[in-house]
Amino acid sequence: MPNTRSAKKRLRQDEKRRMHNRSIKRSVRTQCRKVREAAAAGNIAQAESEIRKAAKLLDRAAAKRVIHPNSAARTKSRLAAAIVKAKRAGGASASTQAVVAS
């Protein structure tokens, strides 16, 4: 247990910041999961709408240094790649269905 008043205050501030940063990280992870789930389900429109929200949260977290800026950029890139992959998979299945129908 710290003895000085400044050390006690620092502990209070650190705990408050830790809880705030935890909530920001959790909301970022949740939003990224929504993008991945929409892309996996083949719901491209929803995935693109969710990725805009995720990018905003990631950029804000990186600007506040809650997460590293490179980590935010990498995550945004991976989410975008997941959507592109889902688009390609959706397009391939549609063309396959057209061939089967004719």
Image: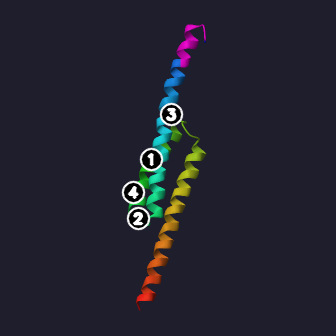
Q: Tell me the tag on residue 49.
A: 4
Residue drawn where x is 57% and y is 43% of the image = 69
Alpha carbons under labels 1 and 2: distance apart: 20 Å
**Closer to the N terminus: mark 4 or mark 1?**
4
Q: Is residue 44 above or below residue 52?
A: below
From which residue to which does the magenta span run? Answer: 2-11
Reading the image, the residue beneath label 1 is 56
Reading the image, the residue beneath label 3 is 21
Q: Position of residue 60 (x, y in %)?
A: 47, 41
Alpha carbons under labels 2 and 4: distance apart: 10 Å
Alpha carbons under labels 3 and 4: distance apart: 25 Å
Reading the image, the residue beneath label 2 is 43
Residue drawn where x is 47% and y is 78% of the image = 93
Badge 4 amino acid? Ser
Question: How many residues crowd mark 2 within 10 Å: few (<14), some (14–19), many (20+)?
Answer: some
**Closer to the N terminus: mark 3 or mark 4?**
3
Q: Position of residue 99 (x, y in %)?
A: 45, 88
Q: Is residue 52 magenta?
A: no
Question: Mark 4, mark 1: which one is toward the viewer?
Answer: 4
Kindly state the secondary structure of the residue where label 1 is placed: helix
Q: Position of residue 3 (x, y in %)?
A: 60, 7
Is mark 1 in CB contact (under 8 Å) with mark 2? Answer: no
